[in-house]
Image (tube, rainbow, N blue to C red):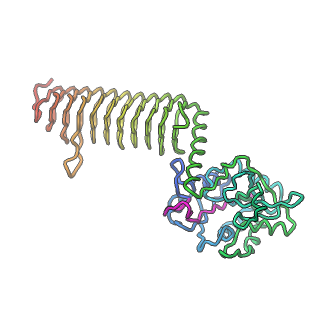
Amino acid sequence: MTLGFIILAAGQGTRMRSQVPKVLHPLAGRPMILYTVDVARALTDFPPVLVVGYGAEAVRRTVGEAALYVEQVPQRGTGHAVLQARPVLEGRVDTVVVVCGDMPLLRAETLRRLVERQRESGGPFTMLTLVSDDPRGFGRVVRDGQGAVRRVVEEAQATAEERAIGELNAGVYAFDGAWLWPHVARIPISLPKEEFYLTDLVAMAAEEGRQIETLQVGDPLELLGINTRVHLAEAEAELRRRINRQWMEAGVTMIDPATTYIEAGVTIGADTVIGPHTHLRGQTVIGRCCQIGPNAIVADSVIADGCRVLASVVEGAVMEEGSDVGPFSHLRRGARLAAGAHVGNFGELKNATLGPGAKMGHFSYLGDAEVGAGANIGAGTITCNFDGERKHRTVVGAGAFIGSDTMLVAPVRVGEGAKTGAGAVVTHDVPDGAVAFGVPARVKGTR
């Protein structure tokens, strides 16, 4: 038997008050639609069908080849949206799951149970419900005296008595495909908006004497539909709790999980300690036995085993084994600290490599530079890498000693074992083993 997914992602989400399509708003560093797509792909090899509308091209660019697409124009309700997927799915899948693209917290295990319940029952469909004191705009599930589901009434059309019903319709269904397609085509139009609502299938099945199965979800947050920025923040907090718990269970220590922010694409090795107020973003990879934070921001970077990042920003950078940075320093894109390299406080590297065991203690800037093994960069050293039109490289050889407040005017090379005096302005290459001092720097002696 083949399982297919329809993901409803056509709406603008007017209550978000944004020009960005609702399903593209980010959660834990990823557009929310990708969470639903991932869940669908975890349960079936048949690509999910995304029903797109507002911002269709942006949604396609974001999701790419992970899904098939149908466009809903004009947008005339959920029933009309599902009908658009009929040419793609009819005759190709026997069970059809319908889910909204704004439910990023819905777990694969829950949908697997939903599908199993539907296939065991053999009925027209099974729907997810929840019992909650906070209806969040969900429709109410109306049952008869024997407990059979008779209809779903939307909150806007519900009477006071119906609004008091605690069982809510989550808008997530597993349909028997053979029953779905002829029935969804017969959904009556609803006035005054002239839309076709998927919930009308409940009454249609009940009128035929068919039994409608339900699966109650215990955690209301799992069925949180995002309609406002408040909902977005609630989902972000829940997703962050899930991510933090996952890493703690995998052997990562968090001093204060409540102030630790880890995005979904991050990976962390065991026995690493994450300090408070730390943000790990993008496709960051952190090794084992590291100390990250407190007060660190690491984005799209690779940090090897045994590294330390204290109160610093690391973005698009690489730190090799046993290197460290901080406090209050910045490794910008293209920065690389080789094994055992050290950057102290108030240092900045951009497109620069600090070789094995090299040290840049404090108050220095290296841009478009390569520093050899064991070299020492004195306080206040600056690479003058930009002439107003082009960037130029600086090379500092292994074992070199760069005196405090040295200006290295690129392109320039300081040789292996060479030294510069404090305050030197180096405009020409310094040979291996030589000493350069003064303004402009003059070379004295070689090995």
Q: Is residue 131 left or right of residue 88?
A: right
> x and y percent of residue 359 in the render?
31, 28
Instruction: Residue 33: name its quadrant.
Output: bottom right
Which percent across, then down, holds residue 442? Answer: 10, 32
290, 193: nearer the viewer: 193
The picture places residue 266, in percent across and down from the top left corner, at 51, 41
> Which quadrant does the N terminus fall into?
bottom right
- Which is nearer the eye, 320 or 407? 407
Judge from the rendering whether residue 75 lies leftward or rightward of residue 159; answer left or right: left
Q: Which residues are magenta?
A: 1-22
352 vs 314, left or right, is left
Is 100 magenta? The answer is no
Q: Is residue 2 magenta?
A: yes
Image-quadrant location for residue 3 = bottom right
Residue sitting nearer the eye, 16 or 436: 16
Q: Residue at the location (15% across, 35% down)? A: 426
| Residue farthest right in this picture | 146
Task: Give x and y (percent) for residue 143.
Answer: 83, 60
380 versus 12 height, above or below: above
In the rendered image, the quadrant that contains the C terminus is top left
| Residue at the image point whose x is 20% and y is 32% from the top | 405
Q: Height in image: 1 above or below 336? A: below
Residue 210 visible in image: yes
| Image label count | 0
Residue occupying the point 67% across, 71% down = 80
Residue lying farthest to the top in this orientation? 447
Q: Is residue 3 visible?
A: no
